[in-house]
Amino acid sequence: MTESHPIFGTFIFDLDGTILDTMPDLIHVTNETLTHFGYPTHTDAAIHSFVGDGAQRLIYRALPEGTPEAVCAEALEYWKALYPKTGHARTRHYAHMPETLAELKARGCKLAVLSNKYEGGVKDVIPRFLPDLFEVLHGECEAIPRKPNPAGLLQTIQELGSAPERTAYVGDSAGDMRVAHNAGTYAIGVDWGYNPVSTLVEAQAGAIISDPAQLLEFARA
């Protein structure tokens, strides 16, 4: 990062691997689903590699190749029903994230979440861990396509009453950087997430931060 940064009044965040470490719960629920349907479970590393493109792709990648489509669909619904029942007991904040978000809000910044996690999951987990901070919460659904399609990000910006040039999108993946560019926003990568920093560099992150508090350098005082 350089000493001088662009300043933004709107910050939109990815969820998994960016504002919350949800991976332990994702691993647990995925393996519980596989066990329920009589399939072998996966290592933590394998499930980690399946995460990032929404619940459907996570489950379809976890199921054995050749699993009937009807079973895949049933397993997905089972996974979605089980996920909130865990109480997100294994999910944790990233250090300095809650207080950074609170300070951004105190400065009058508009905050939102746009994730590839299914929308019900987003609206369940965020209020449990980070209540009353975000004006808009969106996840994948019929009306919100998966990133890097910019439609969901542009819709979120519109709902906030902001504009792309006043917005920074914050995430931990190449897809997050791409959706930021596709929507005309500024891309901020985080190095504490689920993907190597090299992927953020290759996806042309405008900046890469190593602590949530560094976001304050991009916010109006």
Image (cartoon, rainbow, N blue to C red):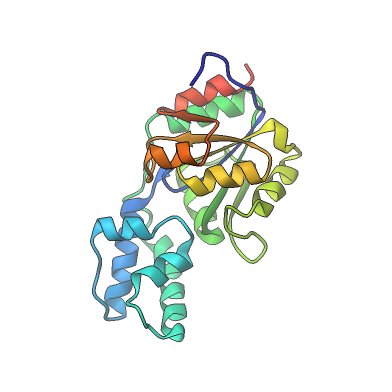
Image spot of residue 3 (x, y percent): 52, 13
At 34% from the left and 66% from the top, the residue drawn is 30
- The answer to whether 159 appears left or right of 207 in the picture is right
- The answer to whether 206 appears left or right of 20 in the picture is right
- The reply to whether residue 89 is visible in this rendering is no
User: Does 29 sit above or below residue 11?
Assistant: below
Residue 92 or residue 220, whichever sits in front: 220
User: Does 80 sit above or below residue 156?
Assistant: below
Q: How many marks?
A: 0
At 46% from the left and 24% from the top, the residue drawn is 213
The quarter of the rendered structure image containing the C terminus is: top right
Residue 125 or residue 203, whichever sits in front: 203
Q: Residue furthest front?
A: 202
At 39% from the left and 35% from the top, the residue drawn is 191
User: Does 44 sit above or below residue 197?
Assistant: below
Residue 15 or residue 81, whichever sits in front: 15
Image spot of residue 74 (x, y percent): 44, 80
Image spot of residue 122 (x, y percent): 52, 54
Residue 138 or residue 56, whichever sits in front: 56
- The reply to whether residue 132 is visible in this rendering is yes
User: Does 3 sit above or below residue 20?
Assistant: above
Image spot of residue 115 (x, y percent): 54, 51
Q: Residue furthest top?
A: 3
